[in-house]
Image (cartoon, rainbow, N blue to C red):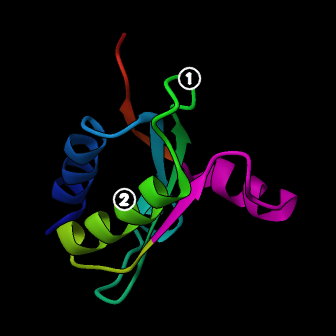
Amino acid sequence: MDRQQTIQAIHDYMMGQPVVKAWIFGSFARGEERPTSDIDILFVPDFNHGSFTLLTHGGMYEDLKQLLGRDVDLVVDGSLRPYAKESADRDKVLVYERVS
């Protein structure tokens, strides 16, 4: 799966999840991924409908790992340490935003 196919797969997957927004960051966002690179995904869960839980997060992680055929770092927006947030903010590319 190439970079654009990966982005499309993440977008399509997020459409069916309790997610408001999602970005990729890190090597995939910079176009520097390698065959062994993981995919870093930052997302805003939809807490408004009470449908996002720790089990949801774990299920999404497993689903994305299988779908993309790579290891995934699935990070809730706001949970990164300041130094990591700065780096993610520099790199991040929006891949999904829910349209109301």
Is residue 82 magenta-colored?
yes
Residue type for callout 1: Asn
- The residue depicted at 23 percent of the width and 47 percent of the height is 13
Q: Earlier in the sequence, mark 2 or mark 1?
A: 1
Mark identifier at residue 48: 1
Please give left or right for residue 95 compared with residue 20 in the image: left
Residue 49 position within the rendered picture, expressed as x and y whole percent measured from the top left: 49, 24
Residue type for callout 2: Met
Residue 5, placed above or below residue 96: below
Task: Tell me which corner region of the image, top left, top right, bottom left or bottom right, holds residue 88.
Answer: bottom right
Q: In this view of the protein, which residue sits in the foreground, 76 or 40? A: 76
Residue 59 position within the rendered picture, expressed as x and y whole percent measured from the top left: 36, 62
- The residue depicted at 25 percent of the width and 61 percent of the height is 3
Which circle, 2 or 1, is nearer the viewer? 1
Q: Secondary structure at mark 2?
A: helix
- Do residues under tags 2 and 1 come within 8 Å of each other at their CB atoms? no
Graded by Cα atoms within 10 Å as few (under 14), some (14 to 19) or many (20 or more), the crowding at tag 2 reads: some
Residue located farthest toward the top when viewing the structure as drawn: 100
Residue 76 position within the rendered picture, expressed as x and y whole percent measured from the top left: 60, 51
- The residue depicted at 58 percent of the width and 58 percent of the height is 75
Identify the residue position indicated by label 2 in the image.
60
Query: Split into 4 quadrants, where in the image is the C terminus?
Result: top left
Residue located farthest toward the bottom when viewing the structure as drawn: 36
Query: Split into 4 quadrants, where in the image is the N terminus?
Result: bottom left
Q: In this view of the protein, which residue sits in the foreground, 46 or 74? A: 46
